[in-house]
Amino acid sequence: MTNLINMFYALTNTLGYPNYGWAIILFTIALRVLMFPLNLMQAKSTRAMGIIQPRIKKLQEQYKNDPAILHRETQALYRKYKVNPLSGCLPLLVQMPILFALFSALRNFEYVGGSSFYWLKSLTEPDPTFVLPIVVGLSSYLQSKVTIASQPAAANETAKMMNYVTLYGMPVMLAFMSNNFVAGLAIYWSVFNVLGFLMQMLINMSVSRAQEGLAAKVEADEKQAEIDEKKEELRRKNREAERKRAIAARRKTQPKSPVKQRADNNEKGKPLDFDD
């Protein structure tokens, strides 16, 4: 991570404006661009999971007593609509190690050409004006807002509470933490969130267009499944009616048992009540 920051510092030196603050900004931009495909994949997967969730719930109700069949049918559903539920974790798995490594690198970073950046006297100390912590909090709020807006509506109170914490609690916590970060890390986090907000808006527009076709396909499949279910129920009723008719026909054509035959013969010739 230290070598990467020095590499971007060398780039700013080549551009004629050597500064570690700009090196961190350029590094963050490059990282965001590289992560954009993963973020797009995550957004598509999240939206697709929301679209097929009613089908999954139906499978859970249908095969609640048979976990093996439920797993098989759920995996078949994922393959049919090309949904990978694990892809939503990829951006976080990539981002967290980078953040920890960058935190460690910037905490003990040796700024060869000086560490001042505009109003900041040193990137190795927290921002005394609280500008960066405020930017971190606001940008985190905006990014969370557009991200939550792109996801399906919360299905229960627990999900609603998680969204509430993510939207309001996390920005406050990050702003508080950034107040103790070295300014270099706060610059990274601020730029990372601002770019994340802008890219999430692009992702939302892209995913909305891409998932319209999936939603239409799922809806058409659900209607077809209902039609097939009704046809199968009608066939089942027809088979049951045919079975009952066959049983009734066999009973009519079966010869009477000897006991029944003797009883019928004994009844012959007896006077009726009104003959007395």
Image (cartoon, rainbow, N blue to C red):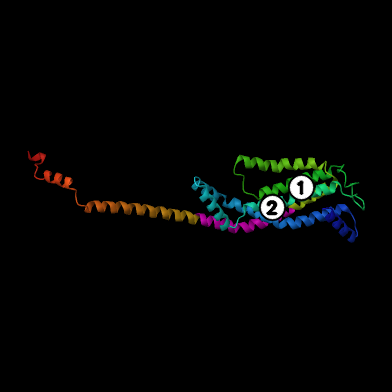
Q: Element at badge 1?
A: helix
Q: Residue at x 73, y 45 (%)?
A: 141
Instruction: Tell me: 19 left or right of 64.
Output: right
Which residue position holds label 1? 139
Q: Residue at x 72, y 56 (%)?
A: 36
Q: Position of residue 204 (x, y in %)?
A: 67, 54
Q: CA distance from mark 1 to mark 2?
A: 22 Å
Indicate which disc residue 27 carries: none
Q: Was residue 205 drawn as part of the magenta stretch in this picture?
A: yes
Identified by mark 2, the residue type is: Leu
Name which quarter of the figure residue 76 lies in. bottom right
Instruction: Tell me: 276 left or right of 171.
Output: left
Name which quarter of the figure residue 17 lies in. bottom right
Quarter of the figure that contains the C terminus? top left
- Residues in magenta, as a range: 198-222
Which residue position holds label 2? 90
Which is nearer the eye, 199 or 100? 100
Q: Was residue 212 drawn as part of the magenta stretch in this picture?
A: yes
Compare marks 1 and 2 and give the one earlier in the sequence. 2
Q: Position of residue 2 (x, y in %)?
A: 84, 53
